[in-house]
Amino acid sequence: MGCGPQNPHGLQLMVYRSGDTVYADVTFDERHIGAPGLAHGGAIAAACDDVLGFALWIAGAPAVTRSLTVEYLQPVMLHRSHRITAHIATREGRVLHIGATGTDPEGTTRFTAKAVFVVVTADHFAAYGDVAAFEHLLRRLGDNGAPSDPES
């Protein structure tokens, strides 16, 4: 839904790591419309959940979302790029608190998000389906193998 290229209706996010943050640029279009000219809050939340989840490259462990809160501060217009930047705020054992901001090209924060993730093992995913399709992602988590920042 968020970053998978196989879903033509997905967000097609490309997520990068820069130090202790991850980020992605997203442009919502008519597939993600809420009110006329504006992105649907659910599409914004999905993008946030995906980018927040990529902060797991920093943690070096797979985890699942326990809770997600999005604060919609300003309207999010269609056909404009927005950068979502996420970082791990705190870690308490298996619990990760991750925060993110969504800004437009002028630097206006349009939305913020925070989530709680719980670290799990690969066995958690195997209980629900075939993990072969994303085993390479699990290995990359262990290597902190995020694509590096193309802007540096």
Image (cartoon, rainbow, N blue to C red):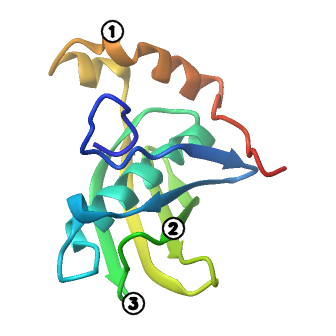
State which quadrant residue 3 falls in: top left
Q: How many residues crowd around disc 3 within 10 Å: few (fewer than 14), some, or many (20 or more)?
A: few
Q: Secondary structure at mark 1?
A: helix
Report, in whole angstroms, how far the alpha carbon at label 3 lies from the one at label 2.
Answer: 16 Å
The residue tagged 1 is 132
State which quadrant residue 69 falls in: bottom left
Which of discs 3 and 2 lies nearer the camera? The answer is 2
The image shows residue 47 at horizontal and vertical percentages of 36, 57
Kindly identify the residue that appears in the image at 48 percent across and 15 percent down.
136
Residue type, numbered disc 3: Leu
Q: Quadrant of the N terminus?
A: top left
Which of discs 3 and 1 lies nearer the camera? The answer is 3
Q: Residue furthest right?
A: 152
The image shows residue 72 at horizontal and vertical percentages of 34, 84
Q: Are marks 3 and 2 in contact (CB under 8 Å)?
A: no
| Labels in figure, total | 3
Report, in whole angstroms, how far the alpha carbon at label 3 lies from the one at label 1.
Answer: 39 Å
Residue type, numbered disc 1: Ala
Kindly identify the residue that appears in the image at 26 percent across and 23 percent down.
125
Kindly identify the residue that appears in the image at 48 percent across and 23 percent down.
137
Relative to 59, is 148 on the left or the right? right
Kindly identify the residue that appears in the image at 33 percent across and 74 percent down.
70
Report, in whole angstroms, how far the alpha carbon at label 1 lies from the one at label 2.
Answer: 33 Å
Q: Which label was assigned to residue 81?
A: 2
Which residue is more in the foreground, 126 or 43? 43
The residue tagged 3 is 73
The image shows residue 9 at horizontal and vertical percentages of 24, 45
Q: Earlier in the sequence, mark 1 or mark 2?
A: 2
Residue 35 lies, with reference to residue 147, above or below; the image says: below
Q: How many residues crowd around disc 2 within 10 Å: few (fewer than 14), some, or many (20 or more)?
A: some
Q: Earlier in the sequence, mark 3 or mark 2?
A: 3
Q: Earlier in the sequence, mark 3 or mark 1?
A: 3
